[in-house]
Image (cartoon, rainbow, N blue to C red):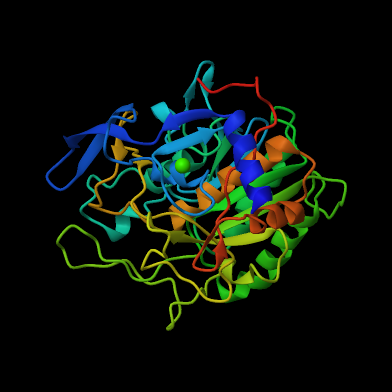
Amino acid sequence: MRCALAALLFLAAHAHAQSTKCLTSTVQVDETTRERHLIACDASFTENVLWHLDRADSIGGELDGVYRRGLTGRGAVIYVADTGVLQAHNEFQRGAGSSVIHGIHNPNIGFPTFPCGENPALTPCNVGVMHGTAVASLANGKALGVAPDAKVIAVIAGDPSWEWINSMNMIIKHAFDPSTPPFRTAIINYSAYLNVRPENRAAVDERIRTMVNGVDANGNPDPNGKRFFFVIAGGNAATPYQDGSGRSTPTQCGANGEIIHRPSVLAPEIDGLVSVGAITKENRFWEYTCRGASLELAAPGADVFIASHRANDLYRLDPVFANSGSSYAAPYVSGIAALHLELDPTLTPQQLEAKLKASPSKAEGLPVPVAPANPYPKRRSVR
Ligand SMILES: [Ca+2]
């Protein structure tokens, strides 16, 4: 306890305190969708809009309306393997351009429609980037992100079968490109397309293990090559749309609410791959998050404030479609992993997993990763 207290005091000493209470305004986008503008954040406001950041400096789980931001993920690279990211969103704008520095999209697949195909209320259903934009904003957004100084590469993961291998191979190719920021270990966040068909499982498992342990530019095992830390959403039970339609998403959990899909189910077997479940402001499981023996970490993922793909200045908090899920817990963890890499870029995926699991903060008996202390008192960044 004394050690944790000392760490907190140290964190407070070299951090910039920002209010997580914010003022927003509501925008009626169309008949069924309301979104928000983020106007300002200040202690005088009542709504703890950025509570996920508030949680990132809390050991006991209590929320005080403040995030003492120290490290920012400088030097870390996060591959957001998802539906694509709205690169131009204000959350990703920095002085010189976007923090989303590149996109990887296999031309062999059509433009993804997830999750529009499941929710006709989201019309026109022409933009697949809703989910990926939200996920990336929680890892890397200027106001919302745990690691705003990290760099993001948006990988459109695409079809859940053979595309798994292709997207991983494209990530390796990109990692060795001379224009890519150099790294020893990068983070790959998978919050979408979590399904691997039985006939592809052996190949995907092998590819993940190889990437965790190091690959060369051709993707062959190389312990001195580049390594990848996998952060995987644990999946959600059937979740009702809150649009009055009575419909639900398909379940991703087993009969007892346990994680069953790959690769989350491999989390206990693979050191360097973690599965993440969603918790609420009350530090309890979000009711629809898959759990069980394969769930390793818990992180804020219920009623979180996310960037919207509909315009560069729009956000979502009202749960017309969804602003909760293990999808949004995973990028919080990817952001915390980026902070650890900022402190020590030589960390291996195995060491990153150990750091995250060693968090002194807990929820439902699982570790909740929190921001490590900042030893760089004068280094400030972002914006
Ligand atoms: Ca706090």
- Residue 279 lies left or right of residue 56; in this view the side is left
**Image coords of residue 70 (percent x, y):** 59, 32
Residue drawn at 39 percent across, 44 percent down: 51
> From the viewer's perspective, is 221 left or right of 264?
right
Q: Nearer the viewer, residue 334 or 48?
A: 48
Number of callouts:
0
Q: Where is 65 relative to 276, above or below?
A: above
Identify the residue at image location x=11%, y=45%: 31
- Residue 188 x %, y %: 61, 49
Q: Is residue 193 visible?
A: yes
For the view shown, which residue lies furthest in the left direction?
A: 31
> Can you give x and y, in whole percent of width and height, for residue 133 in the image?
42, 41
Q: Where the N terminus falls, by quadrant?
A: bottom right
Residue 281 occupies quadrant = bottom left
Which image quadrant is residue 247 in?
A: bottom left
Q: Is residue 74 left or right of residue 190?
A: right
* Outermost top residue: 95
Above or below, 10 against 16 in this view is below
Q: Is residue 170 visible?
A: no
Between residues 267 and 132, which one lies in front from this camera angle? 267
Between residues 327 and 160, which one lies in front from this camera angle? 327
Farthest-out residue, front: 2
Q: Residue at x 46, y 65 (%)?
A: 235
Does residue 185 sit above or below 380 in this rendering?
Answer: below
Place of residue 86 in the rendered image (x, y in percent of width and height, measured from the top left): 42, 35
29 relative position to 275: left or right: left
Residue positioned 52% across, 39% down in the render? 146
